[in-house]
């Protein structure tokens, strides 16, 4: 199908038929796809267009990733130009755009890092796990530091190791068993604290639990701790300000590496270039993807502190180098596009913009939605936001799942795309938002109005069900 301004209904029907007969889609049930589909043909700014002519304001930036917005044609030109020069060569050799991108990303991290290129967030975390283990083999030869401490309800990707590190049971259960070297500490999901405590009297017990875990396992067996600065998938859990500095201090105390997953948080999303920069911590390993290239092409990167990088130095015969290669890692076309993507983020000050427009959006959400009895909590940072829906504010009992899904579906009917958290019965009751960082105030108003109407309907239905 061509990308035209005047979609042809017959052509759309043909694509649907072709797709249903041949393609297997992620996450969505094909029986549901047979009844209803989206066939995306164009997008501009924050707006996505279906082949049937419907337009949607995409308050999820795809899958939390199109940070600079859709339709930046100059990125297509850059990819084409780079492909004409050299489309591909393995990254065992150097290439111009990847070197430039490495320098750019290192500078954004504040310097002192090296950057390893992959193709997705899962691969970025996967490489991070392996780097942590390899580092431990070099630096602690008499020990067996191989375990990763992660958090319950975390999401770190789709491969077996990233799933094992993740803590979302419903995403994991079909693929069990996993190897046992990933352990899960309680998550800082304060509105629904796993320890049944209240901040600040809790003393940030969820961070302290990581130390207990390291001690109980034996520090000589633990390679790293992995955290997402603001947990996105579980419903945008912003931790207390003490949390990350406490986790970092625990890691330092036991010589455990701190691995930060910036796949969603990174590249301006939360109002800083990286989410961890809100808390002044200094990670050893950082996984990125999504916003690094605003999803214009597949690209991820694992950023390692120079102390880790230096552990991989030696003569070739010493065997200390990185023991893996990703065929497409350091792809010149992707790197060239990412370089320009980052320039755009900086030129248009989109991290700062995420902070200011995100501030406007969260104020509007609070002002317009608080009247609905089913709104339990509204939280977020920058343009990473969540509205948690409850059946009962006093007990915080989750709103019925069908009603939560009804809010997402109703917003879509009204031309606004929002997401829903994962995390099974305990956590899948939050409406999540992660719009392009170029979203306008008018678009924020449209988003809030759509949520107001959809949540109002859910509140009516919840009241009716309660009798
Ligand atoms: C926090 C986090 N880490 C890692 C990933 C995996 O990234 P990818 O889907 O590019 O493999 C995701 C994907 O949504 C994510 O949200």
Image (tube, grey):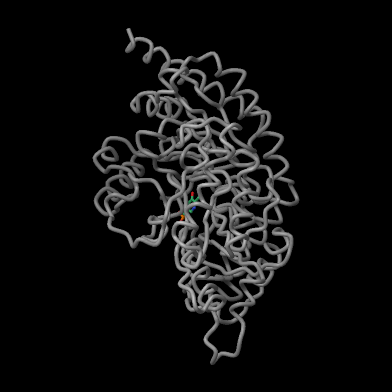
Q: Is residue 345 left or right of residue 32?
A: right
Residue 130 locus on image (x, y percent) = 48, 69
The image quarter containing residue 425 is top left
Residue 190 locus on image (x, y percent) = 53, 34
* Residue at x 55%, y 89% (from the top left corner): 318
Give above or below for 78 relative to 211: below
* Residue at x 68%, y 34% (from the top left corner): 357
Residue 18 locus on image (x, y percent) = 28, 50
On the question of residue 162 being in view, the answer is yes
* Residue at x 26%, y 54% (from the top left corner): 22
On the question of residue 55 being in view, the answer is no
Q: Furthest-top residue in view?
A: 467
Residue 287 locus on image (x, y percent) = 55, 59
The image quarter containing residue 304 is bottom right
Number of numbered markers: 0
The image quarter containing residue 199 is top right
* Residue at x 56%, y 90% (from the top left corner): 316
Give above or below for 130 relative to 367: below
If the image is split into quadrants, where does the C terminus sit?
A: top left
| Closer-to-camera residue (265/218) | 218
| Closer-to-camera residue (235/318) | 318
| Closer-to-camera residue (328/274) | 274
């Amino acid at each position: 199908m061509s990308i035209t301004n005047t979609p042809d209904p017959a052509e759309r029907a043909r694509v649907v038929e072709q797709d249903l007969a041949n393609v297997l889609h992620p996450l969505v049930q094909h029986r549901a796809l047979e009844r209803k589909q989206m066939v995306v043909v164009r997008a501009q700014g924050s707006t996505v267009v279906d082949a049937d002519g419907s337009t949607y304001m995409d308050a999820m930036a795809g899958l939390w990733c199109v940070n600079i917005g859709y339709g930046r044609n100059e990125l297509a030109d850059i990819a084409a130009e780079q492909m004409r020069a050299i489309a591909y060569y393995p990254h065992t050799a150097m290439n111009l755009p990847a070197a430039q991108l490495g320098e750019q990303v290192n500078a954004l991290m504040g310097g002192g890092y090296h950057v390893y290129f992959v193709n997705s967030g899962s691969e970025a975390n996967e490489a991070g796990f392996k780097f942590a283990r390899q580092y431990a083999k070099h630096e602690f030869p008499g020990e067996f530091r191989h375990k990763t401490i992660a958090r319950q309800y975390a999401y770190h990707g789709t491969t077996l190791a990233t799933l094992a590190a993740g803590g979302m049971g419903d995403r994991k259960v079909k693929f069990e068993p996993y190897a046992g070297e990933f352990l899960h500490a309680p998550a800082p999901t304060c509105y629904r604290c796993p320890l049944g405590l209240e901040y600040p009297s809790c003393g940030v017990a969820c961070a302290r639990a990581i130390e207990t875990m390291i001690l109980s396992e034996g520090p000589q067996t633990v390679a790293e701790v992995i955290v997402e600065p603001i947990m996105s998938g579980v419903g945008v859990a912003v931790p207390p300000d003490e949390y990350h500095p406490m986790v970092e201090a625990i890691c330092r105390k036991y010589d455990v590496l701190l691995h930060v997953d910036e796949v969603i948080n990174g590249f301006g999303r939360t109002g800083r270039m990286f989410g961890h920069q809100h808390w002044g911590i200094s990670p050893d390993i950082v996984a990125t993807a999504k916003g690094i290239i605003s999803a214009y092409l597949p690209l991820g990167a694992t950023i390692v502190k120079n102390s880790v990088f230096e552990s991989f130095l030696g003569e070739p015969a010493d065997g200390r180098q990185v023991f893996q290669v990703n065929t497409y890692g350091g792809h010149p076309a992707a790197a060239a596009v990412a370089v320009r993507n980052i320039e755009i983020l900086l030129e248009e000050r989109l991290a700062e913009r995420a902070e200011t427009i995100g501030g406007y959006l969260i104020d509007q959400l609070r002002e317009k939605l608080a009247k609905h009895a089913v709104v339990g909590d509204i939280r977020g940072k920058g343009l990473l936001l969540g509205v948690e829906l409850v059946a009962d504010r006093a007990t915080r009992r989750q709103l019925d799942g069908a009603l939560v899904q009804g809010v997402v579906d109703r917003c879509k009917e009204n031309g606004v795309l929002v997401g829903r958290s994962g995390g099974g019965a305990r956590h899948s009751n939050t409406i999540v938002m992660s719009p392009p960082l170029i979203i306008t105030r008018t678009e924020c108003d449209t988003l809030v109005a759509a949520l107001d109407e959809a949540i109002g309907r859910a509140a009516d239905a919840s009241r009716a069900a309660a009798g």
